[in-house]
Amino acid sequence: MVIDLDRCTGCGACMVACAVENNLPTPPVEAQDNRGLTWLRVYQCGNGRTFPDFKTVFIPVPCMQCDHAPCIHVCPVTAVDYDTETGIVGQIPERCMGCRYCMAACPYHARTFNWWDPVWPKGMEKSLNPDVSPRMRGTAEKCNFCHGRLHRAREKAASEGRRDLNPGEYIPACVEACPTRAIHFGDLQDSEDPVAKLSKSPHAFRLLESLRTFPKVFYLSRQDWVKDVGKSRLEMLRKDIYRDSESESNG
Ligand code: SF4
């Protein structure tokens, strides 16, 4: 996946499409701000200057599908797995025991926790996606590049006697929904794929590259300050999360 930050307007259509596609329930009214479920966050960051030099950027952050994924190594019950064919890091909710080690290990804050049983406003349960099972309370979850869509595309290809998918036959919901076409999706292993070419652009970068997690989500920007801001915003969030969990454990 390659996300062009110079095209993203921060509209949030990708977040909405993700929630609808993956049956993310709405949080109960008593939920605190940071306790709702989301598989994709869009952060707004500024360049730290004042008018007229102020600039802002929106950074959509799904799970990075890291090649060296810290969440896989810390999970004590093997509820996180790595698909060697697609490179997708999958979550197996039936195995998850809710320890949340994966959430602490993920440097991108890409995981959220099911604090409540999934409930939808009356009538909305009729529009749930039948290809994606709702997850139960007490489990961690995250983006899986709309794995349900991959299964559906493979089934269609098999029914037509094909082993391989046609280009564009499988794309995640966020890619489809983005009105500015800021999110590109393809095969990073195929050097001829337009997305693989974009990832090699001199303007491409990944978040927190120094951690050597080797994310499969790349970002594009022609503005140098944008690269630094993505990193510092993630580190700031980490400090906030630690502060919140410390105050919770201190009662
Ligand atoms: S849908 Fe596209 S433009 Fe809107 S926030 Fe997501 S990436 Fe940005």
Image (cartoon, rainbow, N blue to C red):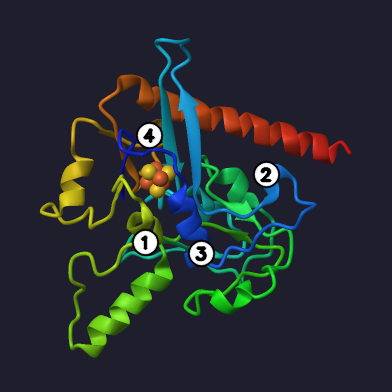
Is residue 143 something one can see in this rendering? no
Q: Separation of disc 4 and disc 2 at Cα?
A: 26 Å
| In front: label 1 or label 3 | 3
Quarter of image, ligand 1: top left
Asked if the residues shown at circle 1 and circle 4 are in contact, with their CB atoms under 8 angstroms apart, the answer is: no
Residue type at mark 2: give it. Asn
Q: Does the residue labelled 4 lie within 8 Å of ligand 1?
A: no
Name the residue that disc number 3 marks: 20
Nearest to N terminus: mark 3 or mark 4: 3
Residue indicated by mark 4 = 209
Between disc 3 and disc 2, the foreground one is 3
* Element class at badge 4: helix
Q: In the image shown, does 156 or 97 lie closer to the viewer? A: 156
Q: Distance between the residues labelled 1 and 4?
A: 24 Å
Mark 1 or mark 2, which is nearer the start of the sequence? 2
Please report whichever mark, 1 or 3, sits nearer to the chain's N-terminal start: 3
At x 56%, y 51%, the residue is 111
**In the rendered image, which residue does mark 1 sit on?**
172
